Image (cartoon, rainbow, N blue to C red):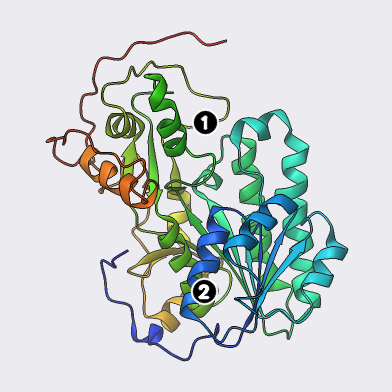
Amino acid sequence: MKSSQPLSPAFAPSPSLLDNARILITGGTGSFGKEFVKTVLARYPSIKRLVIFSRDELKQFEMAQQFNGAEHKCIRYFIGDVRDEARLRRALEGIDIVVHAAALKQVPAAEYNPFECIKTNVLGAQNLIEACLDNGVQRVVALSTDKAAAPSNLYGATTLCSDKLFVAANNLKGSRDVRFSVVRYGNVMGSRGSVIPFFLEKRKTGVLPITDPTMTRFNISLQEGVEMVLWSIEHALGGEILVPKIPSYRLIDVAQAIGPDCEHPVVGVRPGEKIHEEMITSSDSHNTVDLGQYYAILPSGAATIRTYCETRGVKLVEPGFCYNSGTNDRFLSVDDLRELISTHVAGDGATRIDLGRDSRPPLDSGLRAVPELRTVAVA
């Protein structure tokens, strides 16, 4: 991920906080957790402890085949649920850095099972905050989602609540040396349950169902997400919601990249889905700064914002600024998507997307006409 502006002198390199650190990642057996662990083990060989905290023993067993304790002496696997505060407190003993990736993330499942989503995403977040405050943790980075901005579904609403809890946790720290921050980004390419693996699997049927031909989403790779979290651990002052500058794609272009010869019936938007996603709303513009590589939504308060800008040497964005996947100035073309999918999702070559090249230019902020699509009714 390249920065459009140079970072200010305040971001000059310094000895890493991750050297000799003790790290715990909740939801550590997920797609992000595996990439994070792989990166940390390769980049910080002196790390003292790396705890994978999750509730699924089978996923932990499977992950341990790749990252085992015999080869990586720092690795620990803890069975536990963020709903269980007592277990969190025990797991966090001696931990310096926490990355919070545990969440219920499936939009339809959250709509059907709302309080289960609340118990994990909201109550679990507060449990983690309390346990971190009481165990001397120094850095906490929570993963968020574009669905938390102006949420239209329960998953987004619970993540917005979680974001607010982590930002407000900086008001509770007292004299403790701890910083809580949030990273918010779009759909992770190839992550479990996302549209690209779904389309790759459905391609063999000859039918790739489209919810809406104009639907757009932000896109980020797993590695870019990991780099953002590592950046936040090193540089966040506490209270920021960090947002990356990333491209968008249209769902119909993903279908065209994966299955150009497939049927693309329009099946309608699922409950709680948006046509376009936002990561920064216009109402956030009054406390959003441009860091070059990222945006940062700051806690409200003129004094807080002024101090942050002076410390970082940055400025607020223009009033009314918003960051929307449909009006983004960077869009991935069909060719871009095909290459990214081959690299990041089907990278072993077994399922590589080796179809005819698409000569259409990259999409700009205007909407290109879409192919004629068949609409079907669904139960």
Instruction: Look at the numbered disc 2 and give the secondary structure of its residue.
Output: helix
Quarter of the image with the N terminus is bottom left
Q: Farthest right residue? A: 86
The residue positioned 48% from the left and 32% from the top of the image is 274
Name the residue at 30% across, 15% down. 373
Q: How far across and down, in percent of the image, does residue 370 sit?
A: 24, 23
Residue 84 in view of the camera: yes
Horizontal and vertical percent for residue 41?
A: 53, 75
Question: Which is nearer the eye, 234 or 276?
Answer: 234
Secondary structure under tag 1 reads loop
Three-letter amino acid code at the position of disc 1: Glu
Q: Nearer the viewer, residue 250 or 67?
A: 67
* Viewer-closest of 159 and 164: 159
Crowd rating for badge 2 (residues with CA inside 10 Å; few <14, some 14–19, many 20+): some
Q: In this picture, is 359 found above or below 2?
A: above
Residue 278 relative to residue 71: left or right: left
Quadrant of residue 288 within the rendered picture: bottom left
Residue appearing at x 42%, y 38% in the figure: 196
Q: Residue 364: in sight, yes or no?
A: no
Residue type beneath disc 2? Val
Q: Determine the image quadrant of residue 351.
A: top left
Sequence order check, earlier mark of 2 and 1 = 2
Quarter of the picture containing the C terminus is top right
- Answer few, some or many: residues within 10 Å of disc 1's Cα (few below 14, many 20 plus, some between 14 and 19): some
At 63% from the left and 43% from the top, the residue drawn is: 157
Mark 1 lies on residue? 273
Residue 64, image x, y percentages: 64, 62
As drawn, the label of residue 40 is: 2
Q: Is residue 45 above or below residue 292?
A: below
Give the CA distance from mark 2 to mark 1.
34 Å
Position of 335 with respect to 271 (left or right) is left
Q: Which mark is residue 65?
A: none
